[in-house]
Amino acid sequence: MTEEKPAKKISLFALIALVISSSIGSGVFGLTSDLAGASAPGPVLIAWIIVGFGILMLALSLNNLLMKEPKLEGIFSYAEKGFGPFAGFVSGWGYWLSAWLGNVAFATILMSALGYFFPIFKSGQNLPSILVASILSWSLTYFVNRGVEGAAAINTLVTICKLIPLFVFIVFGIVLFKGHLFTQAFWNNMSNSFVAGDVMSQIKNCMMVMMWVFVGIEGASMLSARAEKKSDAGKATILGLVSLLAIYILASVLPYGYLTQNQLASIKQPAMLYIFEQMVGTWGGYFIGVGLIISILGAWLSWTMLPAETMLLMAKQNLLPAYFGRVNQKKAPTFALVVTAGLIQVFLFTLLFTTKAYNFAYSLCTASIIVCYMLVAAYQIKYSWAHIQEKGNRQQLLIGILALLFEIAGILMAGISYLLLCFIAYIPGIYFYGRARKNNGQQHFLSKKEWLITAIIVVGAIVGIWLVVSGKIII
């Protein structure tokens, strides 16, 4: 009888690297143009400080709950444990929406990158782009259904392709940085003076894109459970986030010292590709482009599994009907994968009619996941208050309060209209939740409280539709 080897633990350094690699996606490659369209460099720096602090509070909340509630499976489980099954459904459905909408954002930025090499794809929103993106989406679904998603070699390649182009871009950005260009319109386009109202408006306009690049930070916190020492978990979270902030700030702010804000705002997506081409010549565009394409394909592969896995876990916990949790011989949730891929397909074709497909997709993705994050912070508050006499829980209570306030402020400042649009997708989900209740022996389709929340969601969805029809939301 052979002795079973203990599971290999992750070192502090490796854990920090995992925090960074699991959070960096396609967003950083288009960051500069989106921010320049919203703000001058001064407000951008303030916004990064605010968002960085808020995300840190969320990550520390997740890390604390992971240690205190190790048996809970799935990020939506915190909402279910703290506030009941309907809250768990709302959180899980929001997380599922965010995951596949993120894949739509991957598709649009990928086709834009391919447009650099093959002009037929142009901005990534024409019919050839959508057809190729559709083929890729269904191919990745097929591969994940065959159990390919966990290939370590792919993950290693993706990490390299993410970090090397970013590092080279930042080095050249520092070398070519022009201080006088950076400071000549530091607070706004009109003058260099600080005007509180205008600065706050610019900070607000930065919030959604900044929060988008941190989507996935919850995955990084979950990895901390495998640390060599539990004390390494908090250290890795903080050091990893500081490293991420440094990468994001340098990659997004340094170009303000190379091109004017107007030039940056009008540059095509993915912005980093075209900025680096101007910095070093044609080879720079090819260098960033190849790295970005491989990086997105790898990330898209991983995130193809994520929404289906969320549905599988929700079905296991009776938040969705059992057929959402059906798996094949490879233990892949085939039904959930096909449903999710079908919705991605429908959304891809709607991009033919949108003006800024990438911005629209990541805004919906961010708005939907904020619901999940808010419920995590709320459970952090509830758990810490219930165990307030235990050591460290007063500090954890404050962390939870700050995380919740940040998420509420973020959605109110930047994403309430997009959240209302996400409510439309909640309506069929509530039907499936009700079916799961009935199948599980519950007397009523929904409880009185659940009907009330459903009514609020339906009203919000109607308002969202009206905002689109009236032109208040431009898609």
Image (cartoon, helix red, strand yellow):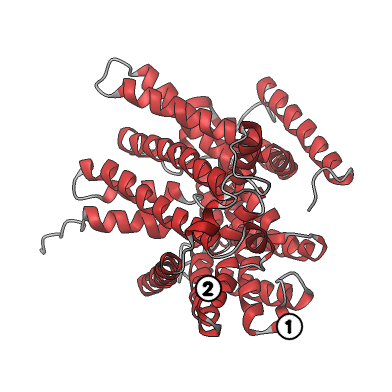
**Left or right: 61 in relation to 291:** left
Viewer-proximal residue, 108 or 96? Answer: 108
Q: Name the residue located 66 percent from the left edge and 21 percent from the top edge.
A: 449
- In the image, farthest residue toward the right: 470
Element on which disc 1 rests: helix
Name the residue beneath numbered marker 2. 276
Q: Against 383, is 175 above or below? A: below
Viewer-proximal residue, 172 or 344? Answer: 172
Give how far across and how far down residue 35 sits, in percent. 60, 53
- Residue type at numbered disc 2: Phe
Q: Against 47, is 255 above or below? A: below
**Residue 80 visible to the viewer:** no
Q: Bin the neighbour count of mark 2 within 10 Å (Cα to Cα): few under 14, some 14-19, many 20 and up.
A: many
Give how far across and how far down residue 14 sits, in percent. 26, 58
- Splitting the image into 4 quarters, where does residue 424 fall? top right
Split into 4 quadrants, where in the image is the N terminus? bottom left
Q: Against 331, is 375 above or below? A: above
Element on which disc 2 rests: helix
Q: Gap between marks 2 and 1, in whole Å? A: 22 Å
**Left or right: 229 in relation to 326:** left
- Splitting the image into 4 quarters, where does residue 247 fall? bottom left
Name the residue beneath numbered marker 1. 120
- In the image, farthest residue toward the top: 389
Q: Bin the neighbour count of mark 1 within 10 Å (Cα to Cα): few under 14, some 14-19, many 20 and up.
A: some
Which mark identifies residue 257? Answer: none
- Residue type at numbered disc 1: Ile
**Left or right: 323 in relation to 306:** right
**Residue 291 visible to the viewer:** yes
Q: Name the residue located 50 percent from the left edge and 29 percent from the top edge.
A: 404
Viewer-proximal residue, 79 or 445? Answer: 79
Give how far across and how far down residue 129 sits, in percent. 71, 75
Give how far across and how far down residue 13 sits, in percent. 24, 56
